[in-house]
């Protein structure tokens, strides 16, 4: 490979401590849910990852099922680790997860010890790693005792498969229980990964950040751009090269006339601050220090650079926050 990471990469990024742990995460992290499957050229994936690392993004987030097909994002990132990032493993925080449907039969989804440990081993194989830095329970399983799921996470750490563990999309009551079980087992829960953006505020209604603070956990919020809605791309129509046009997880009928109007209002507010709408959206999720990192996705390298530009203006006035509340309320 001809890639040499930018020697100034640690000067630009800000790093935030993850709860009461020793681990710091970049304020902006990169997720590989979309655009890292077989539907995307390998060179695009390499460009996105190299640009991210050059900008100080040290954290890359994966899951067993990212693709398509499921597993292919971990394979692609494993390739990039061997080519572009060879020699930099100790500068990287790599996460994976198990919880959603991954393989047929009763042992291929949810929260059993059987599934989590087998899936973690499969992820390590696809990534070509001995361990991941963070391993998550990807969703709460109502039919498996929480002791079993948390016990599996504890085992994954004790057996050397992961350094830290986390939970994703658990509500605050489940989070409190999970954190207590893990604390008793001696493997503190590092982090929670919830969805959060100006248009999706369930964690505020649920009091999640207060529970995380109590438990000493950090957080990394996914879809901070509402899958691209909170960027400049849908202000007029739905561009052909956008996620909404491609029959993926962003349904075009979410982009109603009312929504488009509100997005334009937010875009004007962003422009007044000298920011793109994407930068405003990222900065807004980081306004509470209990949010450790904003977990963005990108379909091209230039989007990563645009989002990292959010760090130039993280402060908000009370008036701006009130106006954002008005514009984003549905
Ligand atoms: P975002 O809300 O950040 O949306 C990313 C998309 O927005 C990009 O793919 C791109 O879409 C568009 N975009 C990004 N930056 C810009 C920009 N600067 N200008 C214009 N458009 C931009 O997050 P994702 O939905 O991608 O999710 C991020 C990560 O969160 C995932 O990769 C995954 O790691 C994690 N996640 C976790 C879940 C969980 O259950 N724990 C669930 C979902 C996500 P386009 O293709 O239109 O260009």
Image: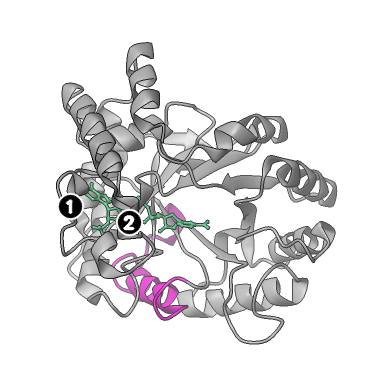
**Quarter of the picture for ligand 1?**
bottom left
Secondary structure at badge 2 equals: helix
Which label's residue is closer to the chain start, 2 or 1?
A: 2
Residue 273, given in percent of the width and then of the height, sits at: 21, 22
Q: Is residue 309 visible?
A: no
Residue furthest front in the image: 257
Residue 108, given in percent of the width and then of the height, sits at: 65, 79
Q: CA distance from mark 2 to mark 1?
A: 27 Å
Residue displayed at 41% across by 39% down: 199
Secondary structure at badge 1 equals: helix
Range shown magenta: 66-92
Residue 205, given in percent of the width and then of the height, sits at: 60, 33
Q: Which residue is mark 2?
A: 253
Q: Which residue is mark 1?
A: 302
Is 241 situated above or below 231?
Answer: below
Mark 1, residues whose alpha carbon is within 10 Å: few (<14), some, or many (≥20)?
few
Q: Quadrant of residue 97?
A: bottom right
Residue 132, given in percent of the width and then of the height, sits at: 55, 63
């Amino acid at each position: 490979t001809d890639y040499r990471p930018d020697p100034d990469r640690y000067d630009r990024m800000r790093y935030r401590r993850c709860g009461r742990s020793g681990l710091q995460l970049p304020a902006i992290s990169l997720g590989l849910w979309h655009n890292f499957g077989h539907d995307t050229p390998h060179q695009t994936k390499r460009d996105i990852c190299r640009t991210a690392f050059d900008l100080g993004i040290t954290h890359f987030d994966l899951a067993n099922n990212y693709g398509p097909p499921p597993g292919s994002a971990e394979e692609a990132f494993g390739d990039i680790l061997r080519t572009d990032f060879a020699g930099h493993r100790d500068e990287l925080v790599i996460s994976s997860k198990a919880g959603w449907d991954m393989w047929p039969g009763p042992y291929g989804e949810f929260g059993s010890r059987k599934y989590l440990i087998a899936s973690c081993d499969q992820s390590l194989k696809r990534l070509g790693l001995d361990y991941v830095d963070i391993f998550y329970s990807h969703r709460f399983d109502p039919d498996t005792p929480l002791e079993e799921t948390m016990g599996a996470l504890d085992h994954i750490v004790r057996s050397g498969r992961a350094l830290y563990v986390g939970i994703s999309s658990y509500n605050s009551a489940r989070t409190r229980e999970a954190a207590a079980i893990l604390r008793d087992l001696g493997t503190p829960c590092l982090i929670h990964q919830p969805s959060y953006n100006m248009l999706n505020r369930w964690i505020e209604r649920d009091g999640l950040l207060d529970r995380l603070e109590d438990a000493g956990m950090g957080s990394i919020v996914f879809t901070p751009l509402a899958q691209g809605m909170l960027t400049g791309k849908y202000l007029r129509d739905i561009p052909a090269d956008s996620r909404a046009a491609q029959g993926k997880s962003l349904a075009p009928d979410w982009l109603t006339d009312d929504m488009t109007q509100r997005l334009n209002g937010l875009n004007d507010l962003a422009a007044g601050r000298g920011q793109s709408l994407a930068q405003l959206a990222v900065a807004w999720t980081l306004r509470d220090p209990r949010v450790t990192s904003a977990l963005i996705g990108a379909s091209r390298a230039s989007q990563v650079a645009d989002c990292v530009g959010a760090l130039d203006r993280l402060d908000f006035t009370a008036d701006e926050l009130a106006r954002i509340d008005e514009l984003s309320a549905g």
